Image (cartoon, grey):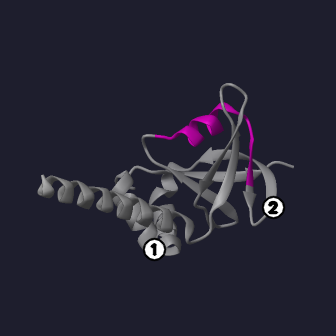
Amino acid sequence: MKYVYGLLASLVLLIAIVFGLQLAASERVEVVELHTIDAEGAAQTTRLWIVDDAGYQYLRVGADGSGWFSRLQANASFEMTRNGDTQRYVAELRHEKSDHINDLMQAKYTWGDSLIGVLAGSRDNSVPVELHPVD
């Protein structure tokens, strides 16, 4: 029984380490807050990574989608807070920039991007989301 408890304790410790690394990887470099509205009309805030390229800001969604991306697509516009400044945007998917945006994310978020890529799956089919400010 002593070995079972030791194995269980080791497993719990390993899980805690993985989640701790994921949290450290996610929050150690710039994170923005995306503000969307769900199907019930409730406000939802999601913390995401962001990169800049050629005058635009880019988020990235995995090929299998996510809750924040579904909410973003369901509404004509959304808000995002970056460096304390909240603005309204519309999104344009830029599939053709996937490799370039992945490279920018890797350069900015370094080992964090690699770790999240391993935990969440390959970045090969991710989709860049180009943000356009709404006046």
- Determine the secondary structure under disc 1: helix
Q: Position of residue 87 (x, y in %)?
A: 80, 53
Residue type, label 1: Thr
The residue pinned by badge 1 equals: 110
Residue at figure coordinates x 33%, y 59% from the top left:
118
Which amino acid does the dot numbered 2 rest on?
Asp
Residue receiving disc 2: 85
Q: Residue at x 87, y 49 (%)?
A: 135
- Label 2: which secondary element: strand
The percent coordinates of residue 71 (x first, y second) are 63, 35
- Residue drawn at (65%, 67%), measured in percent from left and top? 54
Numbered badge on residue 67: none
On screen, 78 above or below 42? below
For residue 67, above or below residue 15: above
Question: Between 80 and 1, which is closer to the camera in this rendering?
Answer: 1
79 and 93: which is toward the camera: 79
Q: Is residue 57 magenta?
A: no
What distance separates the C-alpha of mark 1 from that of mark 2?
Answer: 25 Å
Q: Is residue 72 magenta?
A: yes
Residue at the farthest top position: 40
